[in-house]
Image (tube, rainbow, N blue to C red):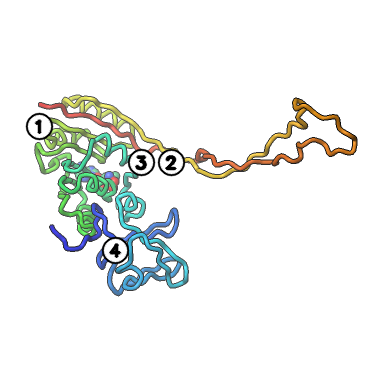
Amino acid sequence: MRRTRPTMSFVEYSDLIQDGDVVIVYMGHNSVMPVKVQHGSQTQTRYGAIRHSSDLIGQRYGSKVTCSKGGWVLVLHPTPELWTVCLPHRTQILYTTDISVITMMLELKPGSVVCESGTGSGSLSHAILRTVAPTGHLHTVEFHEQRAQKVAEEFKEHRVDHLVTVRNQDVCKDGFGVTGVADAVFLDIPSPWDAVGHAKSALKKHGGRLCSFSPCIEQVQRTCEALADHGFQEISTLEVLLRVHDVRTISLPLPDFGPDHSAPSEPRTTEEAPPTATLSPASISIKTTTPPREMPGHTGYLTFATKPRT
Ligand SMILES: C[S@@+](CC[C@H](N)C(=O)[O-])C[C@H]1O[C@@H](n2cnc3c(N)ncnc32)[C@H](O)[C@@H]1O
């Protein structure tokens, strides 16, 4: 589709906010909210109302917007990473730490064809779409009807629906709805071992990559067995744990070793002040990092495998 003016989409950047866009309102580090821009509408925040017609439409993405109570927020262009931290949850979702490793290990790139199940809340799906655009495609399968419908609406609102097909079916019974087309398959379902055969037939004849996400080690064991039985190779399981260090300035006291006796000293008279120890600073200020006291724990095991060329 050719557009005369660049328009917001989750896979293309646009400069100006337009009617119908989805913008991410950033109010603080842990306070981010998606807003559908509609001429004449208002959105309430803790800093007061944002009036879409005057405060959003025609403004630059990244602008600081003053709300009706005088406080301000930033209006950001949507990205899959921002969507992941503010999307409406219908299920448990994958977060960016796991998603980044999944993207790399599945070797996803522009043009890749990917099969996924279940779609869930679409957190991973948006990241896949951004990576495979503009020529790739995502075939995603979700057996829960309302979830499938809702995520299809979101793909439309986010202007990525031309890159994705949502199928409302059971992946363990009916597969992905495509055969011999996928470069990569991703599974996030309770019984992935039942979908391994369908994953194999969805992958291209000359092979491809598979990843399955499971919280429990017993699920991993069954999946690895099924993968080996179906002739998958390079089977490996890993877990990604992220430690975010706090960068801050700290003040360290300097030790006072007393007067410096090694320096050649002039004979002194009794009236002279004691040597320079009192002149040195009592502390220094340095930038450093400190590890977190608490960090997110286990999300799930990621099992990867390769379908060899047949
Ligand atoms: C944990 S959620 C997936 C979350 C998703 N990865 C995300 O990042 O938002 C699992 C989803 O798989 C769906 N599901 C479970 N078993 C399925 C099956 N056999 N076929 C299709 N969908 C299935 C569930 O309805 C649920 O929506």
Residue 298 vs residue 78, the one in the foreground:
78
- Residue lying at the far front of the rendered structure: 266
Q: Residues within 10 Å of mark 2 (few under 14, many from 20)?
A: few
Point out residue 293 in the picture as x, y percentages from the top left corner.
52, 40
**Which residue was labeled with disc 4?**
16
Residue 278, picture quadrant:
top right
Q: Label 1 sits on what residue type?
A: Lys
**Which residue was labeled with disc 1?**
205
Which label's residue is closer to the chain start, 1 or 4? Answer: 4
Rendered-image quadrant of the N terminus: bottom left
Residue 72 vs residue 123, the one in the foreground:
72
**Which residue was labeled with disc 3?**
97
In three-dimensional space, the C-alpha distance between marks 3 and 1, rounded to whole angstroms, equals 31 Å
- Image-based side of 68 in relation to 40, left or right: right
**Residue ID at (14%, 35%):** 203
Residue 179 vs residue 112, the one in the foreground:
112
* Residue 199 visible in rendering: yes
Q: Is residue 124 above or below residue 47?
A: above
In three-dimensional space, the C-alpha distance between marks 1 and 4, rounded to whole angstroms, equals 44 Å
Q: Label 3 sits on what residue type?
A: Thr
Which label's residue is closer to the chain start, 4 or 2? Answer: 4
Q: Quadrant of ligand 1?
A: top left
